[in-house]
Image (cartoon, rainbow, N blue to C red):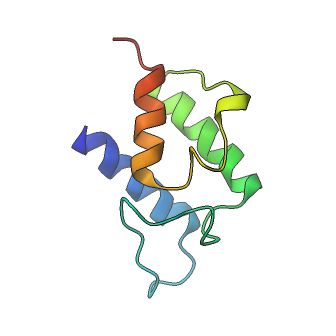
């Protein structure tokens, strides 16, 4: 699980952090703080689906579900095969 969290955090930092003074952690609000917008959320969803070989229904890819790395990890885990 830590490996997944680190992988997602690294992706978010590399793709969406514009100012190096802004620290993004596992609990940083990504959507409500403006790091990830609706367009970026779509690319993040595609990344997650490809990387973890899952399919996230559009109605589950909500701003709330994508608002932190921890929330994203929970979403991804819920669609991974057990």
Q: Residue 50 at what x, y percent from top left?
A: 54, 29
Vertical placement of residue 28 versus 79, above or below: below
Q: In the picture, residue 40 is in which quadrant?
A: bottom right
Quarter holding the C terminus is top left
Q: Residue furthest front?
A: 64
> Outermost residue toward the left?
2
Residue drawn 45% across the image and 46% down it: 71
Specify whether 69 is left or right of 56. left
Position of the N terminus, as image quadrant, is: top left
Q: Where is residue 55 in the image (x, y as percent from the top left)?
A: 59, 21
Asked whether, in this view, residue 11 is left or right of residue 6, the answer is right
Q: Position of residue 2 (x, y in %)?
A: 23, 44
User: Going by the image, does 33 lie left or right of 53?
Assistant: right
What percent of the width, then of the height, locates residue 33?
59, 72
Q: In this view, does 41 lie above or below 33?
A: above
Q: Relative to 70, does residue 80 appear above or below in the rendering?
A: above
State which quadrant residue 47 falls in. top right
Identify the residue at the far right of this view: 39
At horizontal 46% and vertical 31% (from top left) the residue drawn is 76
């Amino acid at each position: 699980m830590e490996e997944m969290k680190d992988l997602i955090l690294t992706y978010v930092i590399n793709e969406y952090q514009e100012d190096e003074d802004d620290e993004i952690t596992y609990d940083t609000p990504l959507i409500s703080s403006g790091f990830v917008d609706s367009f970026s959320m779509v690319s993040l969803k595609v990344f997650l689906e490809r990387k973890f070989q899952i399919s996230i229904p559009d109605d589950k890819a909500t701003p709330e579900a994508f608002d932190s790395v921890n929330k994203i990890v929970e979403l991804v885990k819920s669609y991974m095969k057990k």
